[in-house]
Amino acid sequence: MAAVATATAAAPYLALLGENDTDLKAYALKSINSVVDEFWSEIANNITEIEELYEDETFKDRKLAALVASKVYYNLGDYESAVKFALVADEQFNINEKSEYVETLISKAIDQYIKLNRNAFSNAHAEDIPKELTKIFERMLERSINEKELKLVIGLAIDAFRLDVVESIIKNELSSSDSEETSLNLINYTLSIATSVVDNTLFRTQILSSLVDIITINLKNPDYFTISKIIVNLNNHELATQLFTNLIKGQSGTNGRLIAYQVAFDLVNSASQELLNKTSLDLEETSTSSDSNEKVKNKIIRILSGVPTSDFDITFLQKNNNTDIQILNKSKTLLDGRNSIFHNAITFENAYLHAGTTDDSFFRSNLEWLGKATNWSKFSATAALGVIHKGNLSQGKKILQPYLPGTSGSHYTKGGSLYGLGLIFAGHGREIIDYLRQHVVENGGSAGTDEIDVILHGASLGVGVAGMGLANEEIYEELKVVLYSDSAISGEAAALSMGLIMLGSGNEDAQNDMFTYAEETQHENIIRGLAVGIALLNYGREEQADDIIEKLLAHQNGILRYGGAYTIALAYAGTGNNKAIQKLLHIAVSDSKDDVRRAAVIALGFVLIRDYQNVPRIVQLLSESHNPHVRYGTAMALGISCAGRGLAEAVEVLEPLTKDSVDFVRQGALMAMAMVLIQQNEKTSPKVKEVKELYATLISSKNQDGLTKFGAAMSQGIIDAGGRNVTIQVENSSTGALNTKAIVGLAVFTQFWYWYPFAHFLSLSFQSTSVIAVREDFKIPDFEILCHSKKQFFAYPPQLKEEEKQVFEKVKSAVLSTTVKAKARAKRSKKEKDEDEMDVDEKKSESAKPTDAGDSTVTQDKSETEDDEDTVVKYCKSPYKLSNMSRVLPNQLKYISFQKEDRFYPVRKFKGTNGVVVLADKQPEEPVKAIKTVRQLNNKDAPLPKPFQYEPEDD
Amino acid sequence: MTKETSEQIEVDVVLTPEQINEQTINKADSALHLIVKTVETFDQRYIFKTLRDLVSIRKKLNVHVLSHLINFYLNDTTKQYLLQAINASPSTEQQERGEVLPEINLTIHWLVQLYLLDQAQLQQLDMLNTQFIIPAMKQYNRRSLDLINAKIWFYISRTKELLNDLVSIRAELLLALRTSTIKHDNETSGSLITLILRNYILSHDYSQASNFIEKIEFPKNVSTSIESRYFYYLAKINSVQLNYSDAYEFVITAIRKAPQTQNAQGFLQSAFKLSVLIELLTGDVPELSYFNKSGVPQQVLKPYQDITQAVKLGDLKLFNDSLAKYREVYIADDNLSLVERLKSNVIKTGIRIISLSYTKIHLKDICIKLHLDNESSAEYIVSKAIRDGVIDAKINHQLGYIESNELNNLYSTKLPQEQFNQRINFVNSLHNDSVMAMRYPPSQNRRDVNTKAGNEDELDEEELMNALEDLDSDFF
């Protein structure tokens, strides 16, 4: 080839191609093949000749011609043609060759294959995939399998929608190795890809079903916890029933029983109400062989009812309630209760602060203030009781009894109490739903009159919240009757509740009904209710909701386009789908209606829940939009996606918005800030103190707009919500599953823009932050768990001091005059005892600057932080102890462990999951000191050893 | 040494070589520090600045500075061959360094290349290139390396060119081009394309070159210096292939895109020369002011000015005289063939001038005016000129004269419109390009909020923006 190396043109060989003699042609081809990388630009002129050679079936070296053509196309950058010719070059194309050409072509070939196969999956009439392409794909997979790159292969196979390959790999691995560790790893890997990456819902269902088969049939020790995750994803109650019956029947004894309980608790935490209900119904029908099994079964059914979980939660919240009532009292005095917007603000602040704690003392001690509520603020105030008692399933109805219909109160309290009742039983509505439905049915026909409408409004919302995700057609029909009476007040609630009931079902008929009626009715309220209802109905449906999204977005009615934006938000929640984001960004800058643009930006927050770190960057430019609605949307999007994460970048974007020139933007920014910084202390987010002070200043300031003050008061409630023991958790940090209830809560909460009572929906997204370890008999043993980190990162923020408030107020009134000094002197004599405070006072009176009080505490604080060098949460070898059922923050979870030598140990390896943990007891006979739950406390006559054999029906 | 000390007594600002070395090392250090920043922030612009800063110390590079950098930054294997290449002894101190950033590694390689090139140690450099640098570049696939790779390839190719060994590097360049295209490494592909074209042109392989440009797609978003180079070569190739109008457009683009700094003078001059020739070949005559450009010495363009004059006057004699006089210059500029082609243009211009002055003229008179031998050749030339559209006239063969047609009013033709359209298009595309090149200013809001924290970064950013204002000065 020496001659070739010095050649400066391929022309001689190209000329030979024109000869008639096939040997000459073959020789020319061979020579060209060796110089093609250098002279491709010249050879490309004759590419048609080379292609003709390939097409000439009689030519013996036609495959070589194909190879040369492929190389030329490769150099020309036309990879599709290059792959086409490489494939027909057959054995001439050596896939094991280590050259850039081969590697590039193979990767392009795989890309092509993936594209074609995906197309074939969703489209029955898709073009056929060339056999050679499949062969290359499979050969590459084989090569990786031989190199033990199994995860890579699984990823590729899933990408190409080749379920058979995935299955065979896992099965092979199972049969080839003794330990099931690696296969379990693979299964979990597949599961996580399937749930987080695969965007075709149909294919995802297929993967998940096949995984269940593999786990149950092929594994010797099936991993029930993995199955339970799959069940939640598939929403398949038959599988759940099967799982439980297996566990009950299984030979594993105590352990199997305990696992069953743990799985049941997990399901309650993450599964839809429909799934839970159907599973327990199925379980009731199955008969078990022995008495003991029957007991286990009943216990599972009991757990699935959600009662124990709610009971534990509420006990935790009540026991650890750490509300700073000072903040609330101060805001109450500052905001005039006669003004309904301020009355509402305090109502919501109170509701959030005490959500789930059952502490309604604020209402009881401020009856006079409560009396100032009129009309709908009365409605909200009564419903607030429901938020405060959220999850108090046993006492709920008793507490609201004085306000329910049938008593002598106003119709606003009646409606509010029904709504409140729904909130108490949110997501666990079995015990109450019939009662609520009764009100809907009784009044359904006579909607339109003032009184009935208010009651219906409350009852419909109550039914919706309590029966969320039940997908119960009867309830749906009952609500439809209310809707069809075409009354703005009750119709709106009914429309929304229809969506709640059918949550995520994608029910075609319901969707059509709602859409058609939205086009017919004249009431904007009802249209809005329906629009949001349709969004709820499509929760998590991803591309299956595309049709309705298109229809809504293309509609001339702005309210329906608004619904379209929300439908994208909920259908694609947490998927980070690029198409959805693009669509939303487009709407956000181009729609003619402000409401729609606002909704589109808010929707971005929902879609990006899992990629929350990127949200500040994406919405940053939008936060500087000229349109205040878009800015408001930005704030909310940040609040939603970064809720409870304490992300510093998000705070950075929000901060300028709190000083915005438009009042409602400030409101949104304040609330979003509270959502982001919920449960943070100064150690984890230094900004917290500043933000809280900002709320206080805004509320007390005389020249702030009402809307801003309203926002500040709500924010005070959110940031310290649930006695400082709850967070807003939209994504389960350990399993990566989305928290449906929280997302729905947030979505409806954002509707408070139009209708304040919807603000109560935020309570649905509050999740108590605790580790509650329970024994098989649902007793909560009093023992200690370990936390491998420093205490101060997870401490409660300090409470507001009484004095501080006085100092503050005094300074407020400190007008520059000599009277200030006189007053200060008087004060000094009063407060002789405290030297420090006096110093502060003196400084104040001399400089008469209102900020000094804050400054002095800040400097004090700084010296404290300097003492302690650690500013980042770190793993510590020496743990400190926490008692069972105490506050454990989400970012604290990974440092929590159980003592190995302890009497109690978790039945599932503890991997940072919050909520209920089922314990195994090494000494079951020994008596144990247990923490009493709210239900037990209220239920004194039940015999203590076996509290749950009795079904207390009276409450 | 004594000489230096005595100098120091007189002018104490003059620095000792040691101090200069120290300054150079400091500059290099801070430039290399920016590279780390690029890697951290994925912001390519820092590398731009590094390369710019480093070019400024090119003149001051010496064995001492380089060996210090090599010893300080690189690991043992690399150290060894680089030190050998610059004839420095390896330092005794052994310090363990962590992972060397590929960016820093290759940047130092590049500095060594510069040094060896400036010292004219071509053989040494060539060996270093083929044995170590090319394999080293192939190891990495990082986008932050793009700009550095582009530079290094330039010097590899330049070395070969100086060694007059053009063909052997061609395959390597083509291969690298393929690789960089696949990796979407635009800067390197752009650079390689120009290098390959240059390679073809230097070896007068114009047909290959035109084959090549037909098939490749010049990448977007490459430095303007590389782009202008590319357009220059396009102009060159097109002009050789008689495609003057395209060639003219290309050469104008090349001149417009060329960096307006001292370092780019050489390129600009050759581009000017080419543009004069192409303009003449298209039948136009450049303005006199064209030859009085600021920054371009008069004598540089003098040969071309003379030729232009000959063409303008249509004076064949003058043309032949200048051609004989400046022949060597044209050969050196690789423009001789183009100049020779102008001969027919001289004649055509002569004819045009005649046709402008006379509405009717005998062929014999033309012969006299143009110093032609006989009437038939004059007839031939005139008829060709008519066919080419140079003049608008008729030949009366019987009586042996030509008669010009009535001159059209230029403003009644479409010509002004076309000109106008062309200019508007240019302005529009300039506007579009500027809009696309804009970046959002740092947010005003943010500045208010954290004035303290962001200060340092902001300073950096400002400095960077200033540096980028007059970017790409160094490539020529």
Image (cartoon, coloured by chain):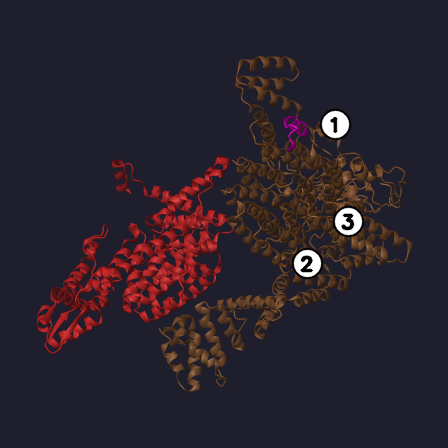
Name the quadrant containing residue B194: bottom left
Under circle 3, the secondary element is: helix
Whole-angstrom CA distance, mark 3 to mark 1, is 37 Å
Report the magenta residues as a range. Answer: A327-340
Instruction: Answer with left or right where residue B67 lies relative to residue A535.
Output: left
The local crowd at label 2, few if under 14, some if 14 to 19, many if 20 or more residues have their Cα within 10 Å, is few
Above or below B354: residue A701: above
Q: At which x and y percent is residue A428?
A: 77, 47
Q: At which x and y percent is residue B320?
A: 14, 67
Which residue, given by chain and number where applicable, does mark 1 sit on? A365
Which residue, given by chain and number where applicable, does mark 3 sit on? A265
Under circle 1, the secondary element is: helix
Q: Quarter of the image containing the N terminus of chain A? A: bottom left
Of the two numbered discs 3 and 1 in the rendering, the one whose residue sits closer to the viewer: 1
Of the two numbered discs 2 and 1 in the rendering, the one whose residue sits closer to the viewer: 2
Amino acid at the residue labelled 2: Glu
Amino acid at the residue labelled 1: Ser
* Residue closest to the far bottom: A21
Nearest to N terminus: mark 2 or mark 1: 1
Whole-angstrom CA distance, mark 2 to mark 3, is 32 Å
User: What chain is colored red?
Assistant: B
Above or below B12: residue B311: below
